Amino acid sequence: MQEVQPPKKPMAFYYILVLAVMLLFNEMARPYFDQAQIEQVDYGTFMDMTENQQISQVEIKDNQILFTGKEDNKKYKTGLVNDPELVDRLHASGAQFNQDIKEETSPIVSFFLAWILPLIIFFAIGQYFSRKLMERGGGNGMLFGMGSNQAKIYVPSSEGIHFKDVAGEDEAKENLSEIVDYLHNPKKYSSIGAQMPKGVLLVGPPGTGKTMLAKAVAGEADVPFFSIAGSEFVEMFVGMGASKVRDLFKQAKEKAPCIVFIDEIDAIGQKRNGANMGNDEREQTLNQLLTEMDGFEGNNGVIILAATNRPDSLDPALLRPGRFDRRVPVELPDLKGREAILEVHGKKVHLADDVDFHTIARMAAGASGAELANIVNEGALRAVRQGRDLVTQSDLEESVEVVIAGYQKKNAILSDKEKHTVAYHEIGHALVAALQSHSAPVQKITIIPRTSGALGYTMQVEQKDQYILTKEELENKIATFTGGRAAEEVKFGQVSTGAANDIEQATKLARSMITRYGMSEDFDMVAMETVTNRYLGGDTSLACSAATQDAIDKQVVALVRAQHEKAKQLLSDNLDKLDELAGYLYEKETITGGEFMRILKGEETVAEAEAEDEAEETAAASHQDDEPHKYNLA
Ligand code: ADP
């Protein structure tokens, strides 16, 4: 898609304008400059020069006398003095002299100069400025563009976005391809009496490609694309937003068939309830939008796509049939989708042969399309930083970590004791995860501090997408969260602040199990909490009595405590492995899932693992000197 810009004036126009202004200035300012160059003398000098016959020409003006010296031919001026004998003296000196003749101006001309000309000048200046303001306001006479729409207009172009550029999201594409088909061939639908939906609402978390999909619909259908954000309608003055809506629809109808895309429609489409009372501007804008959507008859070819990540906050009137009656979910990509998105973005960079998008997609569980695009770009930037011209697998792996946990902190120095604690903490997580058969294998463990504040982390990787989890699996997850703290307790007999994030996550999971998943005996299948903001963090609101809340809290504590005890038991039963692995991690700072599992299963002692690692490093160094770790992926 190419954005359409208003036509520009040719450069010659500006050159001529500047030239005209300069000429005018020159004409007007010259007399003043000329005057400034004439030397001023006192009247006595003028009298002396007259008597000595040193003057050739004299010009008597209203308030001054201009004269020219005979010898130096220089111009002088002096003030006018009441001197009745001046004429006699000048005559006697032989100088040429005269007085300014005042032209009799006709009364019509003087009236014109005094009254009409200033009016014309003011009118012209006014016209000029109002034209300028109109140009900025989109040409409908609104002051500074208020009330006019500022939608960006795109027309189809060869490099437009198509469905093939949007990876994954097959359901959404299938849904939208009907719209494309309609725009190509409206008769097919009208002949049978079918009507296309006027509005399609794309809902999903941020960065999942909603804007891209809307552009792709326009690209596929080869029609113009108007794009505007919901917040652009909200103006300072009541009625301006509504006027923008009118203006947008007027333009869209002129260009029909076309696509109008309203991003973040919740900015204007929020529920009109008591809480919003008083915001007349937003309400009027919404009303106008509703009216416009009702207004266009059956099939005039304007399809409105809108995106939001808060569908539950939208006004029901906006969602009723005849307005945004079709809802297309654009969800976070699954494993296959993530791989496809990485491949699409991977085409834009030069990749080394060792790149395996499947592994990267597995590592980046839960990432949105925008984050995956960012991962590829971060990888490319890392390759440039290290002076390479190909993006390697380790670049991409590192950039997944950058996106998850931030950059490595170069100068964070942990004390020896802290480093030991972090090593035990991280191995605690990994060991508890590995010892419970249902937990996902560990991909990587590191104790290199990151800019996000994490001193170390254990990256777990799901082998495949899991859509449902059993109660046991969830309990195991909680045990894994508590594993870090449990390792510190088992080894050092004391606790540290390092587990704050684990505690938060374990609690959240335990609470959901009890209040939402019906996994407690006491509450059976009763929902105690509802999710209010599904796509933005999943906030919940409690829906139960204070006494029940009390009971919930007690159950959450009991659930987490039981798993914490389980983790401690597992670790104290495997204390030798915990010591061995923590010691190895302390030395190496980053270990892979493969190394971890080999040592755990006793297939390899630490000494062997180190020897193997060294051999690998030497092999890697012969290819690339600057690679600190050669990951050995499980
Ligand atoms: P949203 O409107 O849902 O917030 P965008 O459509 O603006 O997200 O997507 C932001 C960026 O993320 C896009 O420019 C694109 O690079 C990338 N992206 C998101 N989803 C996809 C996808 N399914 N396929 C390819 N790229 C994607």
Image: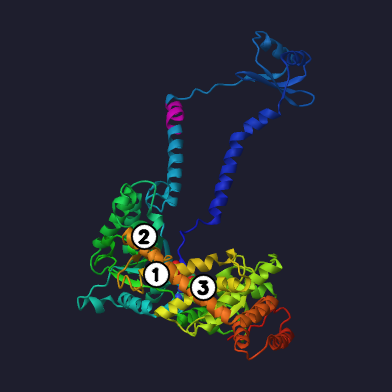
What residue did someone put label 2 on? 266
Q: Mark 3 points at which residue?
A: 481
325 or 153, nearer to the observer: 325
CB at mark 2 closer than 8 A to ligand 1? no
- Let me know if residue 586 is in the magenta part: no
> What kind of residue is marked 2?
Asp
112 magenta-colored: yes
Asked if 63 appears above or below 196 in the picture, the reply is above
Specify the amino acid type for callout 3: Phe
Can you give x and y, in whole percent of width and height, for residue 399 in the image? 59, 74
Please give the range of residues in magenta.
108-117
Mark number displayed over residue 512? 1
Helix, strand or loop for disc 2: helix
x 65%, y 79%: residue: 579
- Name which residue lies at 66% across and 83% down: 630
Q: Up-down: is 151 above or below 25?
A: below
- Mark 2, Cα crowd under 10 Å, few <14 / some 14-19 / many 20+, is many
For the residue pair 543 and 164, the one nearer the viewer reads as 543
